[in-house]
Image (spheres, rainbow, N blue to C red):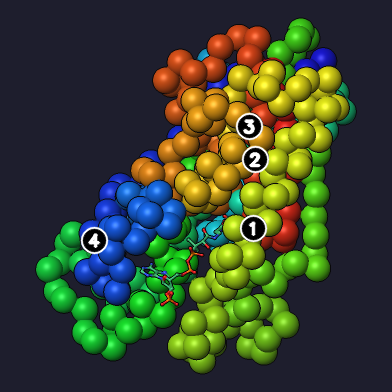
Amino acid sequence: MRSVITGTGIGVPPHLVTNEALSKLMDTSDEWIRVRSGIQERRYAEPGQGSSDLGAIAARNAIADAGLTPTDIDAVIFATMTPDHVLPGNGPLLQAALGLRDIPTFDIRQQCSGFLYGLELADLVLQSGRYRRVLLVGAEVHSPFMPWHLGWDTVIGLSTREVTEAERAANTAIRDRTVLFGDGAGAVVIEARDGEAGLGPIRLHTDGTAAGVLMMPGASFKRRPFVSHEQIDAGETVPVMSGKEVFRTAVTLMPQAVREVCALSGLAVEDLDLLLIHQANLRIIEGVQKALGLPPEKVPHNVERWGNTTAATLPILFHECRQQGLIKPGMNLVFTALGSGLHWGAALYRA
Ligand code: UT7
């Protein structure tokens, strides 16, 4: 029995935000963002639209694509670091929105590796034999992290108001992170099937000693109160990141993880037909591609149009590759990701 992806879908937020639009709010430029990250535009959700809402759009599309109805789903895995609420998680909200049966829903939060960890969990759930169809969703709404009240209307094109000097300075102080992230959702239906196609070896890793390289210090239950105006004013509710360290780690550990799953499957790296990498930065994607000696055409990317959507990058990329006809039966694919935790790893998938 193999775990086979039988349907995919995405949830596209309404606001398309260019680098040019961001440069109205802070000291940045289209050139800086393109050269350092490859990103040209990203999408932002509507105020009041949560990751569960985007996830529900993606999930409906994936279920229909699989030729199923919502009541066919036996379990949900929802990966996000930006849930609608601290409690409950997005799983129950999605279940209610889609009218699923009273099935179990798992909320997981491995940030950029959320979808990859979700694949492992889905595989284990299906291998147990107790469930036949799992819905795996990766969805994020990052825009509320960003202090877009300092120019929200301007960034989504509803106003031509110029931000004040003080607002511009505050936005500029966190520009290294805000320009990178976008909102979005992707979902896949995974079914237990006989045959050659499906998930192969998966290797997951965690290094908690590096938790500090990408984390959010505020809105923490180690603080009393757990969130306050002081924390917000001090920027502690925006994630902090040692960008260069994450970059270096990503271009080292993702290739290692890819080699691991290839070795476990008895494949040479050059036998891979496609490598689907977490879409954080085009320079990281190209770094991993070169480290593995793969030709660029085997390593598709869409970070240019979406920015970094954390748990949503891999299901969105997989969906777009399917739409473009890049994934053909019998192909060997590897998914790989690295992010806050640190969590990283790779999963082999035979189409
Ligand atoms: O999803 C997984 C988690 N995240 C990642 O994988 C991200 C990993 N890291 C990166 O992608 C890169 O490190 C960044 C894109 C975040 C930054 O690129 P970098 O080449 O490491 O730039 P830097 O941080 O060294 O900054 C270079 C300069 C600095 O100015 P000075 O000190 O040289 O005068 C920054 O202040 O660029 C400045 N800068 C900006 N300038 C314009 C930083 N952000 C911006 C900006 N616009 N948005």
Residue visible at 76% across and 10% down? Answer: 196
The label nearer to you, 2 versus 4, is: 2
Where is the N terminus found, in terms of image quarters? top right
Residue 219 percent coordinates (x, y): 60, 77
Q: CA distance from mark 2 to mark 4?
A: 34 Å
Whether residues under marks 2 and 4 lie with C-beta atoms below 8 angstroms apart, the answer is no
Whether residues under marks 3 and 1 lie with C-beta atoms below 8 angstroms apart, the answer is no
- Residue under pointer 1: 248
Task: Name the amino acid, label 3.
Answer: Gly
Q: CA distance from mark 3 to mark 4?
A: 37 Å
Q: Is mark 1 within 8 Å of ligand 1?
A: no
The label nearer to you, 3 versus 4, is: 3
First of labels 3, 4 by sequence position: 4
Whether residues under marks 2 and 3 lie with C-beta atoms below 8 angstroms apart, the answer is yes
- Residue under pointer 3: 293
Q: CA distance from mark 2 to mark 3?
A: 6 Å
SS for callout 1? helix
Left or right side of 105 for 186: left
Residue visible at 81% across and 35% down? Answer: 260
- Residue under pointer 2: 291
Residue 295 percent coordinates (x, y): 55, 27
